Image (cartoon, rainbow, N blue to C red):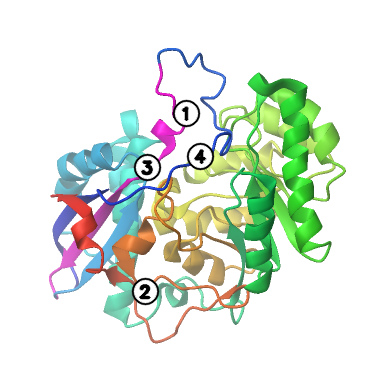
Amino acid sequence: MSKIVSVKAKVYKWTGPVQKIHENFCTNAADIVNQENISNDRWTTYKFHSWLVVEIETSDGLVGLGNAALSPEPCKSVVDTYLAPAIIGESIWDYEHIWQKMYRQTLAWGRKGVGMTAISAVDIAIWDALGKSAKQPVFKLLGGKTKSKLPCYASKLYSQPLDSLAKEAKDYVDQGFKAMKLRLGWGPTDGAEGMHKNIELIKTVRSVVGDNVDLMADVYMGWTFEYAKRMMRLIDNENLRWLEEPVIADDIDGYADLKASCRTPISGGEHEYTLFGFRQLLEKKAIDVVQFDTNRVGGITQAHKISALAEAFQIPVIPHAGQVHNFHISMSSVNAPIVEYFPFWPVEIGNELFWYIFDGEPQAKNGFIELEENKHGLGIKLSNKYLDKFEIIE
């Protein structure tokens, strides 16, 4: 019956070399805070140099793997203290019941942020175990393939000197990508000069990739609403497929205003949680693209529901982050036209760290991702290759 017999949460802390980031690497929500008593590195609290890994073992000897990158040590505490005791003894096939149990028993403090991220990692592990139990890939359990392979976009191009930015963009074109996303490095504290530097980044990449490649830009919540309105007057001339997270996630009315007043599509949802959060975004017509991350939003159980809701609104789902749990969601949805792809890279801010923890993550070929029918569950396993570069907290 595949009952849960153990839930193990581990934190993988990277101890290997870390590549230094450029000045004005990318904006973020903390940029406008007075930096006098804060680390000179404005990305300190937005780096992912540790990762939560959840292993769920079942009564028939299966092990499901889940993971999350946000606040891994607090999330481990949530799993160990609250979630594991609540679900041991449950059948993995009662996944909706398990999800509701975790959600409702932690609702007073866990409905967003750390609590929901921990639930997400556990839920992903359950779905991995379900696929292994059924001897099917997870996308088959969600409805099967809606496309033969997944178009993907190269997601990196952080703000950097224009010559190296151009070279990186050309590399992605040479690898066969037909879409890519860059990061904008200047925000409200940089004034009008910063605005024009952002446009220089966009124009530099466009000059390399041409008009037959989709180009997107990410702000990572780094602008105020007023600054975003001013920037959009310039960006609307650049033919972006979308502008991502221009304002903080809580400013839903700001998103809606920008969406209504600008020609450039607005995307968001990377920092939103659960079906209820996305109902609000969709009902307020706040975004043109839904970008939940499965290992934040509530796991596969919630991501599948949100995908169906977004389809009813005819708003495409393009999940945040190039990880296999997101690929399975996208493969099973006709409303998911493309997926994000983080290239393998020397460890930098850490969103590439999953490449160092897991084996089996699909690699892009000529701008596409393929999911194999003969890989059960999510199709990944823990890697031994870089173990000497991690401290593992059990």
**Mark 4 or mark 1, whichever is nearer to me:** 1
Badge 3 marks a residue whose secondary structure is loop
Tell me if 173 is positioned left or right of 279 in this view: right
Badge 1 marks a residue whose secondary structure is loop
- Residue type at the position of mark 1: Arg
Q: Earlier in the sequence, mark 2 or mark 1?
A: 1
Q: Which residue is mark 3?
A: 70
Q: Earlier in the sequence, mark 3 or mark 1?
A: 1
Residue 280 drawn above or below residue 212: above
97 magenta-colored = no
Q: Which residue is mark 1?
A: 42
Residue 337 visible to an observer of this rendering? no
Q: Residue furthest right?
A: 237
Q: Which residue is mark 4?
A: 271
Tell me if 311 is positioned left or right of 115 in this view: right
59 magenta-colored = yes
Image quadrant holding the N terminus, namely: bottom left
Tell me if 157 is positioned left or right of 108 in this view: right
Region in magenta: 38-60
Q: Earlier in the sequence, mark 2 or mark 3?
A: 3
- Residue type at the position of mark 3: Leu
